[in-house]
Every structure is written in structure tokens, then in C-alpha cells.
Image (cartoon, grey):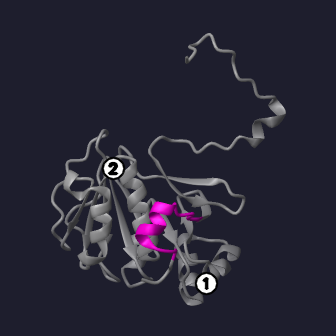
Amino acid sequence: MMRGPGTARHLVPVAELDALALPLGDDGVIAGVDAQGRTAVLGFHHPRPFDVVLVGGLWTAQVLALRLAATGARIAVETGRPQVWTNLVQAVGGDAGAMSVHEVGRVPAMGPTVGSPVVVLRDCGMKPPRGRVSSAPWQSVLTLLPYLSPVAPRLLRSAALAGVQRVSPQEAEQVGRLLALPTREVEALPSLGDGVTLWCARRDRQFAMIQPTDAESGLLGVARRLD
């Protein structure tokens, strides 16, 4: 039998408080773990427009899409290669509206609300056209770029959150200038392992390695930077 408020309180000595590490925010998605094994949580659902750019691989974008759908978000994928999203849509129950795939430039109005947030995932290649649907309250837009391209500087500068996976040394230098990264992080980018991402917000940066679940590995295979 479950006991109510009369249950004895749980006390933690002050000296042990530093050992507690809790991801704050109930709208977050687990983006992996850091070098110390601590969980990295990204918040995508906000009462204001929120743009995210991922310079990385399809595998990471699809894991994030799966996990965002699990938080209750509706995922609208805008892509010119719908065939690579078919299994994912079926896995999350596309018929129920959890995930839908649309041609480039054909994403309809999604009607996001606080109780039904939306993530528009733009998988439109190196030079994605300007989206017909933009970020809005409770609707974030995640743009996937396989590598840096002429549109990358504009997108990275305007993004509230940017993720960068393994890139060439020349691209790392460019990313470092765009995101004002310290030398140590710039030098690390060309040697990142598959599934590792450097996430950069306005004042915070964190490396995170995705640890896929058995279900994610069974559906998407092992982590990979190249599609």
C-alpha cells in the first residue's frame, strides 16, 4: 500500500548536495551524456520562437526526432529524401499525427500550443531554401546541415541553439569564429567520434555523446556521422 504525506522525509546531508545532478526542465530531450557521464538535456519547447541548427549527420537528427516525439511533440519533417524517414514515421505512429513528412516548401500550418508543441525538422541539404513555416511560440525549427555551406553562417548566427559534429579542420576554424569558440574546442571538432555533438547556446557549451537505446539501435543502426 502506498503511503501518503505522512511518510518520513528524505534528508540529504549538505556535504552531499554537490553529488546531485538533475536535468532541469520538463520540456527537455536527452541529447546524450558528457565526459563525466552526466545527462545532457536540451529544451526545444518555448513560449517564443526557437531555432536550432545541427551541422551533423542524419542519424543524430533522427534520434533527436524519436526522442522529441516521445516527449509529446508533433514532428513535421521537411525533406527532399522522404524514403530515409519512412521507417521512422512508421515506428512512431505517423498515422496518429506524431510525425509527418512533407516535400520541401510544403509544410502546412501546424497549430502549435503549449499542450501540443511542434518541431519542424528541415532536412533539405546543403542549401536549404528559406522555410515556408518559421519558428513560433511552442514551435521550434531544427535545420540539419550535413556540412558548412554558404547559408551556414546566417543560420548559425541566428540560431538559439547550435550543434556541431565532426567537421574538417578548415570548417572547425570557421565554426569557431562564428560561435566564438575557444581554441581547445575548435581543435577537438575534427576528431569527434560518431554520435558526439558540441551543443552551443548563447552562454553555454557542452559536448554530448548519444547512447542509443536498444530500440533506437534496432531502428537506426549504429551511430554514424556520414549518411
Disc 2: which residue: 73
Measured as percent of width and height from the top left, residue 84 is found at: 31, 76
**Residue 215 vs residue 68, the one in the foreground:** 215
User: Compared to 163, does 193 lie above or below?
Assistant: below
Disc 2 is placed on an element classified as loop
User: Compared to 108, does 106 lie above or below?
Assistant: below
Residue 134 location, quadrant: bottom left
In the shown orientation, is residue 43 left or right of residue 16? left
Residue 79 numbered tag:
none
> Pointers 1 and 2 in contact (CB under 8 A)?
no
Residue farthest to the top? 6
Q: Residue at x 24, y 58 (%)?
A: 94
Please report the bounds of the magenta region as a residue range.
209-223
Q: Note whether residue 39 is visible.
A: yes
**Residue 27 vs residue 5, the one in the foreground:** 5
Q: Residue at x 58, y 13 (%)?
A: 5
Q: Residue at x 52, y 60 (%)?
A: 213
Q: Residue at x 67, y 72 (%)?
A: 182
Residue 188 belongs to the span the image colors magenta = no
- Mark 2, residues whose alpha carbon is within 10 Å: few (<14), some, or many (≥20)? many
Measured as percent of width and height from the top left, residue 215 is found at: 45, 61
User: Compared to 95, does 117 lie above or below?
Assistant: above
In the shown orientation, is residue 94 left or right of residue 62? left
Measured as percent of width and height from the top left, residue 66 is found at: 39, 59
Measured as percent of width and height from the top left, residue 184 is found at: 71, 75
Residue 190 numbered tag:
1
Residue type, label 2? Ala
Q: Quadrant of the C terminus?
A: bottom left
